[in-house]
Image (cartoon, grey):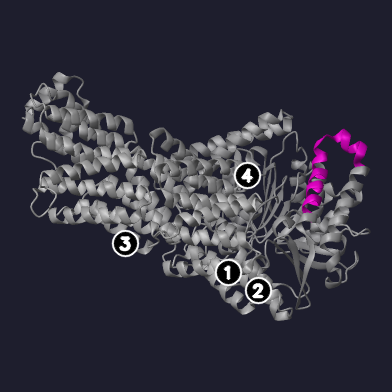
Amino acid sequence: MSTQPNISSDLVQTLIQANTLAQQIRLLQTANLFHEDGLTQLLQYASELIRSDPGQARQLTSLLANIAQQANAPAIKPRANYLQAQTHAINGDFEQARQLIESARAEFQSLNLQQEALRTNIGLMHVLGESGQYQEALAAGQTILDTLAEQGHLDMDTAPPESVMLAAMAYQNSGLCHELMGRYEHALAAYEQAEIRFQKLGLTEHIGHIKNNRGVLLSYLGRVTEALTAFEEAAEIFAAAEMTLLHAQALINIGDAHMLLGNYGQSLDALEEARRLIGPIEALAEQHILLLDTANTYLALNLYPEAAASYKEAESLFRKSGMVHHQARALWGLGMALMGQRRFPEAEEALATAVSLFTQSGNDALLSSVLLEQAALLAQMEQRGEALTKARQALELAAGKDWPIQQVYAHLRLADLLLPDVKAAESMLNIARSQADELGLPHLRYRVYQRLGRVYLLQNRDEAAKEALTTAVSEIEKLRGTLVQEAIRASFLQDKIAAYEDLVQLYLRQNNQQGIEQAFSVAEQAKSRALIDLLTGIAKNQTESLTDSEIATRLQQLQADLNAIYNEALASSLGGERRVRLDDLHHRATAIEQEIQRLRLLHTGYAASPLQSIQSEPMTDLPATTTLLAYHIIGNEVIAFVRHNGRFHCVRQITTTNHIIPLLQQLQYQWERFRIGNNFVKRHLHQLELSSRRLLTQLYTQLIAPLKNLLPAATPDDPQPLAIIPHNILHQVPFHALFDGQNYLLEKYIISYAPSATILSLCQKRPLRPSNTALLFGIADPTIPHVTTEILAVAQSHPKTQIFLNQHATLNNLKQHIHCCNTIHLACHGLFRSGNPMFSALKLYDGWLTASDIMQLNLQGTRVILSACESGRKQILSGDEILGLTRAFLGAGAVTLIVSLWLVEDESTATLMTNLYTQIQKTTCDHATALRNAQIALKETHPHPYYWAPFILVGHS
């Protein structure tokens, strides 16, 4: 920053901190500044200070306004008030800014300083525009231009420099108003008039403003690469001039442009850099805008909870500040995030309010976009007629305008709604394809080509369908390639699975071995991709060391608060406290978990060049004797791929999710009945067993019976290895406990599970650690008293152990000793967080070990046994990404994992685990066989599946 003679930052700071007016006057007199010229120098200093520290600038201008009369410098007061108004506008206090502007104008007029009075209209335009009063703002700008014309000062070739500057500012602010109204051509014309005047004056910094504003327009027009260049040029200008606030504004826009181009990591990085610049200065309005733009990137990555939380916070702040345009944008985004969470009534309300605000402001461009989201919402609520009306209304608004992005989305939405009329849908999609190809934006192209592929599929145009769908998949893969952080890659495919599913159906139409293998390969491509990338080193699971100490401190505080809430929740659930208490704890925990996740996302990183996923050949690494049974769900249809004796088979329509979901809900109810109490269970145990067996028989009939002839012949005396790959809701199915009327599936097969065949293959290839040490952790309490017995019994069955019981079973001991063992056994309480499954946790003596924490550990080549409740429960994202403790341990490197699907009973679990290790050591059988034998033995004394069937083996058998 340049400074005026006789003025230093120390002097300004001393002036601001002076306690009395008399002290301030003495300081100014000593510095020879207590006169109009000196105060004018201080005003110039304050003007430059606004760009880097608006809070300090506000204090200085307030001081100068108060001292002007004593210095016999009456013009200083309105000039100081006008500058002070800028600082209030930056802070989002537009009403106070307007009052100061009007006060300054009145005083200028009373002093007969008419040109300065006219100049206040520039500030008034900004305040009115940010408050959504666009016509009033444009009128204020026109007053400037009309007055200059009357004075003969509108022609920049003959006008004095101050008049050229005033006209340039009026055009610039008019352009912004037109932009916020969606009148993009008017805005570009106004910016052009401003730029040629700034160029004549040689004002590089003001040209940076124009570049920044023009970039926003180019983004709206779909010319995003050009927009990014404009933003980067503006950022370079502002950085060189040390204009911190404007530099941050340009970075926010750079983040937006990268998001539209699919460079999501670069988007978040630019927004984080902007946050670091804005944080130390008082610029609340820009902080609110930064929050909004960060939410937009979260939404693009399908991080719906994080996006919704950010949008809600931003909307509240904009509403309080009167920033109507940005409030409407926040409500629009909030509606989409809530739709992603299927919170339809809340989404409906948010979108309706956004429509109202955009209608009031006359912004038809963004109104068109919100109407399209309302159409999507109505379609999800099965109100197709109303959805079509909204979509047609949106297209009508966009038709004939230079709004290509809105037009593409309108044609896509109409194509969706017009199906099964493939001719009408194809007509819409051909228009969208032409526009999307011209724009070259990957997030538009994959949407267009996926829909075209589906239409061609319905028309039996298989070659055209294949070309369109492979194009869509290629665009999706390019977008995925820029993402590094595992959590982001996991969420990314949620809304993009349709292209893969349509390709699966296309290949299955070939009805031959090649087609089945191609279909299976594509199905694998859409399963647990982010976890595969983690296992192959493509993605990162290590959280970068936080260089921001404020964020690091905040994370530590949040983790401590979360630990305390988990402890309360455990005590409440075990103590039988009222449900309302648990609900309150759940809501508190969810809020903290979301804040932690948002803070972690601030440090994402990105790939300089697209990352290429390793294409595994999953079948080459499975033992020849192992039969693979991989399920896949497309829409409502359950498909099964079976590979036996080197040959693939596929059975379609074996059942539907409509049949499976009610059975799983009833089965879950059967498990929950064991929580009523021991007396109830003892009285009704036989009936409970019959009820569960009936449901398990029905599930067998739906899921296994149609495949019976494709599975190897097996008997309890000659069990055969069977690797099961569930999909979607089928991850909830205890396949090993399905009953055929005589035997449970476990009795005839040695069963292992995996999230995908590729992950199973990767686990098979990973070598086990050479160490033969077992690390045993146990934390007993009155509700799980048999933990100690279990740990000691396991120790007797293992040749070499390290035991940590109760107060010794700490987080630090686990982290210190985890590197020197190949088997890890944890017997403790488990907590599954259904809303935030990567915060599911295991209770150690001094704290909770969450799934996110586990992913930071090095568990390469280990076997992990989790003798804890619900340790194998998981949430499934589209793309079949499993979230929970299973993902965490596999992602950290475990090759074999034994986990529970439901709440387990303490004594029977101890018996099962003791028998499991006895089987491993005495019979030298593999872990899958050992688990099967232990479960069959437990079934003899505890025949209800609740006792013997909760545990499954995932990964290497």
SS of the residue under disc 3: helix
- Depth check, mark 3 against mark 2: the one in front is 2
Upstream in sequence: badge 3 or badge 4 = 3
Upstream in sequence: badge 3 or badge 2 = 3
SS of the residue under disc 2: loop
| Residue 411 lies in the magenta stretch | no
Which of the labelled discs sits on residue 426, or is there none? 1
Expressed as whole percent of the image width and height from the top left, the position of residue 320 reads 41, 33
- Quadrant the C terminus occupies: bottom right
Upstream in sequence: badge 1 or badge 2 = 1
Upstream in sequence: badge 4 or badge 1 = 1
Q: Residue at x 83, y 47 (%)?
A: 946
- Quadrant the N terminus occupies: top left
**Magenta residues (range):** 660-685
Q: CA–CA distance between discs 1 and 3?
A: 35 Å
Q: Residue at x 83, y 44 (%)?
A: 670
Residues under numbered marks 4 and 1 in contact, where contact means CB atoms less than 8 Å apart: no
Q: Amino acid at mark 4?
A: Gly
> In the rendered image, is residue 729 in sight?
yes
Locate residue 511 relative to residue 428 in the image: left or right.
right
SS of the residue under disc 4: loop
Expressed as whole percent of the image width and height from the top left, the position of residue 610 reads 46, 67
Q: Which residue is mark 3?
A: 229
Q: CA–CA distance between discs 4 and 1?
A: 39 Å
Q: Quadrant of residue 920?
A: bottom right
Q: CA–CA distance between discs 3 and 2?
A: 42 Å
SS of the residue under disc 1: helix
| Residue 678 lies in the magenta stretch | yes
Q: Nearer the viewer, residue 701 or 568?
A: 701
Q: Which residue is mark 4?
A: 835
Q: Amino acid at mark 3?
A: Thr
